[in-house]
Image: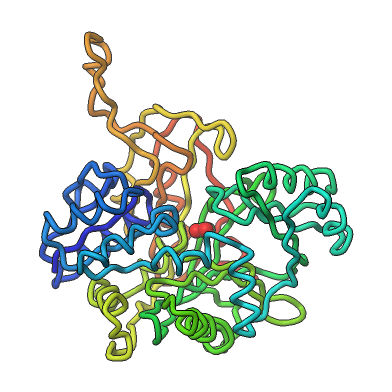
Amino acid sequence: MKILVIGTGAREHALVRSLAQDPQVTALHAAPGNPGIAALAELHAVDPLDGPAVADLAVELGVDLVVVGPEAPLVAGVADSVRDVGIPVFGPSAAGARLEGSKAFAKEVMAAAGVPTAEPRVVTDRAQVDAALDAFGAPYVVKDDGLAAGKGVVVTSDRDEARNHALTCLAKPDGRLVVEDYLDGPEVSLFVLSDGSTVVPLVPAQDFKRALDADAGPNTGGMGAYSPLPWAPAGLVDEVVTQVAQPTVDEMRRRGTPFVGVLYVGLALTSRGTRVVEFNARFGDPETQVVLARLATPLAGVLMAAATGRLDTLPPLEWRDDAAVTVVVASHGYPSEVRSGDPITGIDEAEQVEGVHVLHAGTALRQAAAGDDDAALDAGVLVSAGGRVLTVVGVGADLAAARTAAYAGVERIDLPGSHHRTDIARAAAAGE
Ligand code: GLY
């Protein structure tokens, strides 16, 4: 099977790594990819947001399957362009990706499907902001309706901060936002594969969204993750499939926009029961890095079954007994003023730790500037090129072993000015 993976992050590196281990896969391509992915797949300099260009590339390469990783190409309709040329795609249409691309739309679908979630109020002008904040009270939950590169959600007890975020959302073209009830309780990410009708859950993971230890600091795209969740209720996955994923997929099909790909269900286990915090239309990052590290079933056949409406024929997924922990190494200043261009060393040393592999996200090979002899000497050096630079994955017999491995890997990596959380999976590994 020949596969083209779209995206540049550690999630896509994890997907490519798993696909490379599948004996069915005969060729791997990525666009645009990153230097880590380049070790496993041929890279192509194609704009991932340009649907016709991605479709042309898929035809030219003769791939059997295209896997679209990030949300922006999905919302932009890249999967539609590829389907239009007759190539199976793992990833929803633009209409399906609205489950992530519009918070208000997702709430509308959840209401129609009877999915338990926080009561929302959609705000479309400045005059409605104060009334919405007052209706719910603190802590305030204010969500940009559209995609916002991880910066769309503010949860705060500071009314001015909540109000300012609301006004920032409204100031965008066609700006609108959702204000909703605060959901207490631990959060869980569950990825559910869908072929438009049948759903197949993966294993739950937990993400650490705040920048600093003890869940302090600003929100980020995610600073680490682990799986399994020993503290999660035994029936959680079945409950989410029955109460959330299947009704949502059924509702999308009923609307004539079947959802094909992965429905990322962000959950809060509240004192009043399980509630959906958000839907995303793609794999989560960094949760994918730990979920795929535990998947024993070869990945290509699973994604192809979803893309071609055959999930009902798939044998039950097999999982390793191992635990996995991933720690994100972020660049200086992340998530606000990100510094790029710092040299990265120690990846090989990290991967010598048993159970460790390192996935690239914001990395690049330094380019030589024309006429600059010093820069020419440094050309080809691996440097940081984004906020989340690497994810270091540790796999072990239990969470404590996986955590020890992951942090031993992180210690071997040198990236000037970088930072990482030191408490990923600490409580769970300690049985808390
Ligand atoms: N880990 C959060 C996300 O992928 O959106």
Q: x, y percentage for residue 211?
A: 61, 46
Q: x, y percentage for residue 382?
A: 30, 33
Quadrant containing the C terminus in the rendered view? bottom right
Residue occupying the point 80% across, 47% down:
163
Residue occupying the point 25% across, 53% down:
54
Q: Is residue 251 visible?
A: yes
Q: Is residue 344 found left or right of 250 in the rendered image?
A: left
Q: Is residue 348 visible?
A: no
Q: Is residue 327 above or below residue 241?
A: above
What is the quadrant of residue 116 in the picture? Answer: bottom right
Q: Is residue 119 found left or right of 212 in the rendered image?
A: right
Q: x, y percentage for residue 399?
A: 49, 68
In the foreground, 154 or 346: 154
Q: Is residue 137 above or below residue 236?
A: above
What is the quadrant of residue 380 in the picture? Answer: top left
Residue occupying the point 39% across, 68% down:
92
User: According to the image, what is the colour scheme of the structure?
Assistant: rainbow
Q: Is residue 66 above or below residue 372?
A: below
What is the quadrant of residue 22 in the picture? Answer: bottom left
Residue occupying the point 75% across, 60% down:
179
Q: x, y percentage for residue 97?
A: 46, 65
How many numbered discs sit on the rendered protein? 0
Quadrant containing the N terminus in the rendered view? bottom left
